[in-house]
Amino acid sequence: MQQVAQTRPVINVLGVNSSSVDGVGYDAATQTLQVNFKGKDGPKSYQYDKVPPDLVTELHKAESIGSFVNKHVVRGGFKTHKLEQPK
């Protein structure tokens, strides 16, 4: 049986002021949060499923976006999808 790749939502990502996160975007219809991380080996992008809108609101208010993402999103138990970077 052949598996069909699931299509991920296309999310508009806006830049943020952070040393570890380049940008974040949210699709309210699917409750999908996208985080683009900075990295010495180039950027890495992930999408997190079923992220509640109130968590995204708190993310934008956080004093440290990178710390908030690490504590509440990366370690938050959300299903995670690594996105392929364009070459």
Image: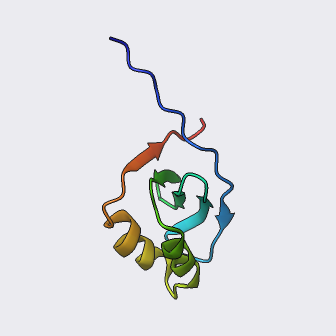
* Image vertical order of residue 37 relative to residue 64, above or below: above
* Image vertical order of residue 27 relative to residue 81, above or below: below
Q: Quadrant of the C terminus?
A: top right
Colour mapping used in the image: rainbow
Residue 8 pos. (x, y %): 54, 40
* Image vertical order of residue 1 relative to residue 74, above or below: above
Name the residue rendered at 60%, 64% in the picture. Answer: 23
User: In the orientation shown, which residue stands out farthest toward the top?
Assistant: 1
- Left or right of residue 28, residue 44 in this image: left
Q: Nearer the viewer, residue 29 or 9?
A: 29
Name the residue rendered at 36%, 58% in the picture. Answer: 78
Residue 18 quadrant: bottom right
- Left or right of residue 19, residue 29 in this image: right
- Residue 87 visible in the current orientation: yes
Residue 2 pos. (x, y %): 37, 13
Name the residue rendered at 44%, 21% in the picture. Answer: 4
- Residue 19 visible in the current orientation: no
Residue 57 pos. (x, y %): 57, 77
Q: How many marks?
A: 0
Q: Nearer the viewer, residue 1 or 43?
A: 1
Residue 36 quadrant: bottom right
User: In the orientation shown, which residue stands out farthest toward the bottom?
Assistant: 63
Q: Nearer the viewer, residue 81 or 67?
A: 81
User: In the orientation shown, which residue stands out farthest toward the front?
Assistant: 29
Name the residue rendered at 53%, 57% in the picture. Answer: 31
Q: Quadrant of the N terminus?
A: top left
